[in-house]
Image (cartoon, helix red, strand yellow):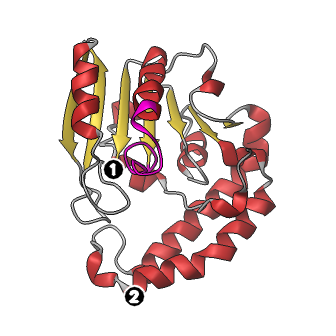
Amino acid sequence: MGMKLDSVVPFGRTLAEYRLMFNLTDADLQCQILDIAAGPASFTAEMYCLGYQVTAIDPIYKFSGAEIKQRFNDCVDRIIGQVENTSQDWVWKFHKSPADLRRNRELALQLFLADYDVGKIAGRYIAGEVPNEIGTTAYDLILCSHCLLLYSAQLSWEFHYQTVTKLLQHTHELRIFPLLTLMLDRSPYLDRLCEYLEKIGYQTQIVPVEYELQPGGNEMLKICKN
């Protein structure tokens, strides 16, 4: 069954958020980066404007910019309303309030859409499931924001280890953020994934980061080849 846009929450994050979520240094920005399950994040667009190389992959890129924007408009009031009703359950550090969270999501979408059509032609945005669409390309660094581990209840253990294993065939380093599920619990796959990866020759490290919106969601998983 093909993906339906009305089943997706098209919220993206900015370069400033990526730098904090993934502890990206100036040296990291020089790398050839792949952003998987990127959605309408403005990371690729902002990086391109700064002269850096980022490729983003997501199934929603089969939709037009207008369709993605409409889906955002259709769901943003409901989602931000839910956040406002539970504002005490969130960490207002980067985003100062639910209204500020909304402004930042709107900014990310605006920057993304400004680059989207031209970027698709240039190959910066690839429509498809990960890791099937990577082909044979190698990347210095692969980033995964708000997909793996977060959706542990929706995506199986088999999906996680198979996807991570395939991604690591294309890079020396993979970073995943956050390590919590949608229910704000540590992913039940995290320890198992680390054990599995270390057995097949990878180093894993849970790294504290400066970004936190979900309480306790201030860590990323860093996976490197030995």
Placement of the C terminus among the 4 image quadrants: top left
**Residue at 39% over, 35% down:** 157
Q: Is residue 181 left or right of residue 77?
A: left
**Residue type pointed to by label 1:** Pro
Q: CA distance from mark 2 to mark 1?
A: 23 Å
Mark 1 — residue?
178
In which quadrant of the rendered view does residue 132 lie? top right
What span is colored magenta in the figure? 146-158
Q: Residue at image x 29%, y 62%?
A: 184
- Helix, strand or loop: magenta stretch: loop
User: Picture coordinates of residue 151 (x, y %)?
Assistant: 43, 50
The answer to whether residue 122 of the structure is visible from this angle is: yes
Q: Which mark is residue 88?
A: none
Q: Is residue 32 above or below residue 170?
A: below
On the image, the x and y values in percent for residue 178 come to 33, 50
Mark 2 or mark 1: name the one nearer the start of the chain: 2
Of residues 181 and 39, the one nearer the viewer is 181
Q: Which mark is residue 85?
A: 2
